[in-house]
Image (tube, rainbow, N blue to C red):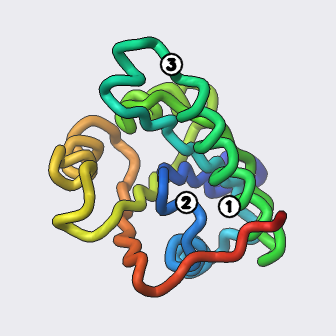
C-alpha cells in the first residue's frame, strides 16, 4: 500500500491536559508523526449547573482556547495537526470525530488517577471496548508544568 491507505491518522482526545508538554512529548514519541495526520479533539466539558441551564458557551470558549494553544505548540514542534471542540462526553467526542476522520489510532490524555474524572468513569477502558483502533493512554501530571500558551 502507498499513499493515504498507509498513512497514520492519529486522533488525540484531551481536555485540560491538551496544553501539556507531556502530551506533546507523547505525541512526538509515537514515532513518525511528522508524516502523520493528527486531529486533536478537546471536549467542551461543562459543570452540571451550566449543562442543565444549557449554557455551553463558556465551556466551548475554554476548550477552544486550550485547543489553540495545543495546535500552536505542535506546529512549533514541526507537527501539523488540525483540531476541533467536541462533545462534553469524551466517548461521544471520539465517535463524532471518527465519523469524518478515519483514525488508525487514538491517544487519550488524562490527569493521574485520583484527579481524573475520565479515569473514574473508565473512559480509556470503555474506549478500548468500543473502538477497534489501538487506544494509547497518556497520563499528564500537572506538576511537570504546562506549555506556554501564546498570547
Q: Residues within 10 Å of mark 2 (few under 14, many from 20)?
A: many
x and y percentages locating residue 110 in the rendered image:
36, 61
Q: Is residue 122 left or right of residue 127?
A: left
SS of the residue under disc 1: helix
Q: Quadrant of residue 33?
A: bottom right
**56 vs 28: above or below:** above
The residue that label 1 is drawn on is 70
Q: Is residue 136 left or right of residue 103?
A: left
Q: Residues within 10 Å of mark 3 (few under 14, many from 20)?
A: few
Q: Quadrant of residue 85?
A: top right
Q: Is residue 39 left or right of residue 123?
A: right
Quarter the C terminus occupies: bottom right
Q: Earlier in the sequence, mark 2 or mark 3?
A: 2
The residue that label 3 is drawn on is 55
User: Alpha-carbon distance for marks 2 and 3?
Assistant: 22 Å
Q: Is residue 106 left or right of residue 8?
A: left
x and y percentages locating residue 11 in the rendered image:
55, 49
x and y percentages locating residue 8 in the rendered image:
62, 57
**139 vs 132: above or below:** below
The residue that label 2 is drawn on is 18
SS of the residue under disc 2: helix
Res 1 visible: no
**123 vs 78: above or below:** above
SS of the residue under disc 3: loop
Q: Earlier in the sequence, mark 3 or mark 1?
A: 3
x and y percentages locating residue 16 in the rendered image:
48, 56
| CB under 8 Å between discs 2 and 1 | yes
Give the number of the mark in front: 2 or 3: 3
Res 76 visible: yes
* Image point (74%, 70%), residue name: 73
* Image point (36%, 55%), residue name: 135
Amino acid at each position: 500500500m502507498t499513499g493515504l491507505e498507509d498513512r497514520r491518522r492519529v486522533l488525540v482526545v484531551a481536555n485540560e491536559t491538551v496544553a501539556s508538554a507531556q502530551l506533546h512529548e507523547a505525541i512526538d514519541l509515537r514515532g513518525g508523526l511528522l508524516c502523520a495526520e493528527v486531529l486533536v479533539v478537546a471536549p467542551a466539558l461543562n459543570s452540571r449547573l451550566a449543562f442543565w441551564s444549557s449554557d455551553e458557551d463558556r465551556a466551548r470558549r475554554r476548550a477552544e482556547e486550550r485547543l489553540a494553544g495545543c495546535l500552536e505548540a505542535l506546529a512549533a514542534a514541526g507537527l501539523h495537526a488540525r483540531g476541533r471542540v467536541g462533545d462534553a462526553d469524551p466517548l461521544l467526542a471520539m465517535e463524532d470525530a471518527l465519523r469524518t476522520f478515519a483514525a488508525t489510532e487514538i491517544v487519550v490524555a488524562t490527569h493521574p488517577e485520583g484527579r481524573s474524572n475520565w479515569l473514574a468513569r473508565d473512559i480509556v477502558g470503555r474506549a478500548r471496548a468500543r473502538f477497534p483502533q489501538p487506544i494509547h493512554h497518556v497520563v499528564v501530571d500537572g506538576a511537570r508544568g504546562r506549555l506556554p500558551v501564546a498570547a
